[in-house]
């Protein structure tokens, strides 16, 4: 018996995978479908402590807010999108809705990734995609290599070389984010 199969678009395939794999992060980066398993406890703790630091720095009422797991529409290819671990966005993020649950990059001030099994995506394609989207700051807690990278101020769809931060140091959040705070490298890496 022959089975007629419908060809899916990349976006439809991403939707099906997201439904079939609850808790996994499904993204399309540069036309490539990626699936990342749920984070471990250290990953989650890093983000929790980062959010606490943002709250202590007075994020409420500053014109920006933090959101975990929000979809960022990427202008790289028609179906591209990312779901950063944490985003600092304009308070009026709802006005930046593009389609489905994707939001336009102009409302994002900084995106944060804490590396997991997909660390090469965070250090490669996402750097390119976020720069092309014009995201003012991209912070990577690179647990694989034990350092934090900060990309900032993209020009001509590219970030300049990142600033590297080692254990024992603090990372100053760029002024473009709209919030003054320094983040501990150890906390970002270890939770």
Image: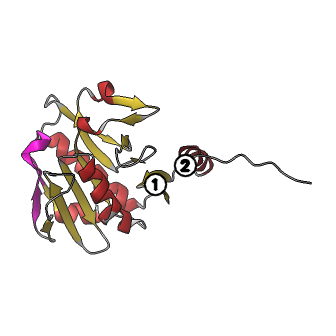
Q: Position of residue 75 (x, y in %)?
A: 34, 44
Left or right of 131, for residue 160: left
**Residue 176 belongs to the span the image colors magenta:** yes
Left or right of 1, for residue 154: left
Disc count in the image? Answer: 2
Residue 93 or 46: which is nearer the viewer? 93
Residue occupying image coordinates x 84% and y 51%: 3
Badge 2 crowding class, 10 Å Cα cut-off, few under 14, some 14 to 19, many 20 or more, is some
Left or right of 155, for residue 8: right
Residue occupying image coordinates x 14% and y 65%: 161
The quadrant of the rendering that contains the N terminus is bottom right
Residue occupying image coordinates x 32% and y 56%: 45
**Residue 171 belongs to the span the image colors magenta:** yes
> In which quadrant of the rendered view does residue 94 lie?
top left
> In which quadrant of the rendered view does residue 96 lie?
top left
Residue occupying image coordinates x 28% and y 44%: 87
Query: Which label sits on residue 10?
Result: 2
Q: Position of residue 77 (x, y in %)?
A: 40, 48
Q: Position of residue 34 (x, y in %)?
A: 48, 58
Q: Is residue 65 above or below residue 153?
A: above
Residue under circle 1?
31
SS for callout 2: helix
Badge 1 crowding class, 10 Å Cα cut-off, few under 14, some 14 to 19, many 20 or more, is some
The quadrant of the rendering that contains the C terminus is bottom left
The residue lying furthest to the bottom in this view is 145
Q: Residues in magenta?
A: 169-182
Query: Which label sits on residue 40?
Result: none
User: Is residue 113 something that shows in the picture?
Assistant: no
Q: Position of residue 131 (x, y in %)?
A: 24, 52
Q: CA distance from mark 2 to mark 1?
A: 8 Å
């Amino acid at each position: 018996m022959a089975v007629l199969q419908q060809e899916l678009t990349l976006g439809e395939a991403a939707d099906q995978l997201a439904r079939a794999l609850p808790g996994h992060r499904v993204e399309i980066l540069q036309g490539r479908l990626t699936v990342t398993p749920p984070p471990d406890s250290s990953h989650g703790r890093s983000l929790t402590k980062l959010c606490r630091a943002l709250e202590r720095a007075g994020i409420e009422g500053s014109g920006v807010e933090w959101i975990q797991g929000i979809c960022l529409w990427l202008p790289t290819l028609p179906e591209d999108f990312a779901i950063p671990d944490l985003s600092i966005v304009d308070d009026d993020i709802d006005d930046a809705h593009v389609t489905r649950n994707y939001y336009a990059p102009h409302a994002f001030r900084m995106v944060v990734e804490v590396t997991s099994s997909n660390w090469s995506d965070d250090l490669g394609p996402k750097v390119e995609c976020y720069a092309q989207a014009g995201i003012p700051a991209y912070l990577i807690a690179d647990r694989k290599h034990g350092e934090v990278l900060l990309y900032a101020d993209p020009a001509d769809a590219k970030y300049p070389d990142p600033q590297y931060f080692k254990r024992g140091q603090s990372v100053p959040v760029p002024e473009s984010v709209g919030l003054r705070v320094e983040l501990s490298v150890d906390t970002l890496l270890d939770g």
